[in-house]
Image (spheres, rainbow, N blue to C red):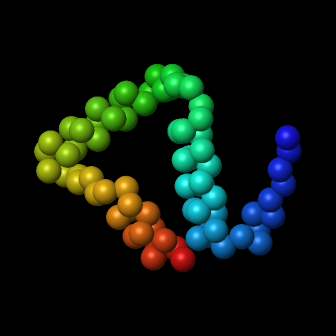
Amino acid sequence: MATTLDLGAMTTADKLQLMDELWQNLSAEVPAIDSPSWHGDVLAERERLVAAGDEVFIDWEDAKKQLRAELG
């Protein structure tokens, strides 16, 4: 099935909403997919930064609200 979207006509908020809906659908329906080999390295580096106090994580729902406020 092919779907065509006029991305140029979509607002940034619309695009973020679409990405969120796609991710929710993929994560609910697709069987486990192996992560790329570099993914473990990125996660380890982020954990190191958090442990060192150089980075912090925020709740995903809060992150989406912040992004929508900045880009909406």
Query: Residue 42 appears at what percent x and percent y?
Result: 37, 35
Q: Residue at x 15, y 42 (%)?
A: 51
Q: Residue at x 40, y 70 (%)?
A: 66
Q: Nearer the viewer, residue 46 or 35?
A: 35
Q: Residue at x 23, y 54 (%)?
A: 56
Query: Residue 70 appears at what percent x and percent y?
Result: 46, 75
Q: Residue at x 24, y 38 (%)?
A: 47
**Is 37 placed above or below 57 here?**
above
* Quadrant in which the N terminus is drawn: top right
Query: Residue 55 appears at what percent x and percent y?
Result: 23, 52
Which image quarter: residue 7? bottom right
* Quadrant in which the C terminus is drawn: bottom right
Residue 1 located left or right of residue 59 = right
Residue 34 located left or right of residue 51 = right
**Is 48 placed above or below 37 here?**
below
Which image quarter: residue 43? top left
Q: Nearer the viewer, residue 48 or 59?
A: 59
How many discs mark residues in the rendered view? 0
Q: Residue furthest left?
A: 52
Query: Residue 30 appears at what percent x and percent y?
Result: 59, 31
